[in-house]
Image (tube, grey):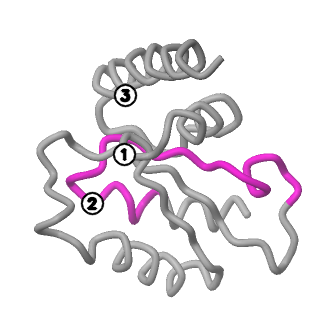
């Protein structure tokens, strides 16, 4: 698995819109099986336009599958719901980081949004 993660991080480092990436799910917990996919949460630059780049997620998933031989599920974490963002931050592992300050700013905002969400939905 270490070799697979190295391949993933090297690939992600070449993708300029990516600020940081988190490994989460069964692979991060150490409970992955041969049939398990690899779950990756990706933090994108704020100015990256997903509408103009609608196929970006599919390209990443396809190229990572070709690289690793395993299905890869991508979540753009800053665009996910607060519950999933919290889960990824709490249980995931940072596997790539291009800009530490931007990642920390995101995590602070996401934490605030999560607690606001919980307060509104009591």
Where the N terminus falls, by quadrant? bottom right
The 10 Å Cα crowd at callout 1, few under 14, some 14 to 19, many 20 or more, is: few
Marked residue nearer the N-terminal end (3 or 1): 1
Decide whether residue 12 is among the magenta residues: yes
User: What residue would you read off at disc 3?
Assistant: 103
User: What residue would you read off at disc 1?
Assistant: 79
Marked residue nearer the N-terminal end (2 or 1): 2
Residue closer to the observer: 15 or 61:
61
Q: What stretch is highlighted in magenta?
A: 9-31
User: What residue would you read off at disc 2?
Assistant: 15
* Residue 60 locus on image (x, y percent): 38, 72
- Looking at the image, is mark 3 or mark 2 nearer the viewer? 3
Up-down relation of residue 16 to residue 57 (above or below): above
- Residue at screen point 11% across, 44% down: 47
- Looking at the image, is mark 3 or mark 1 nearer the viewer? 1
Marked residue nearer the N-terminal end (3 or 2): 2
């Amino acid at each position: 698995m270490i070799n697979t993660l190295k391949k993933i991080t090297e690939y992600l480092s070449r993708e300029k819109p990516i600020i940081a990436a988190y490994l989460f799910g069964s692979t991060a917990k150490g409970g992955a099986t041969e049939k398990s996919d690899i779950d990756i949460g990706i933090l994108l630059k704020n100015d990256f336009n997903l509408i103009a780049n609608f196929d970006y997620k599919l390209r990443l998933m396809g190229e990572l599958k070709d690289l690793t031989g395993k299905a890869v599920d991508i979540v753009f974490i800053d665009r996910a719901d607060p519950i999933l963002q919290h889960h990824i931050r709490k249980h995931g592992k940072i596997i790539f980081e291009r800009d530490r300050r931007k990642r920390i700013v995101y995590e602070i905002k996401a934490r605030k949004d999560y607690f606001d969400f919980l307060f509104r939905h009591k």
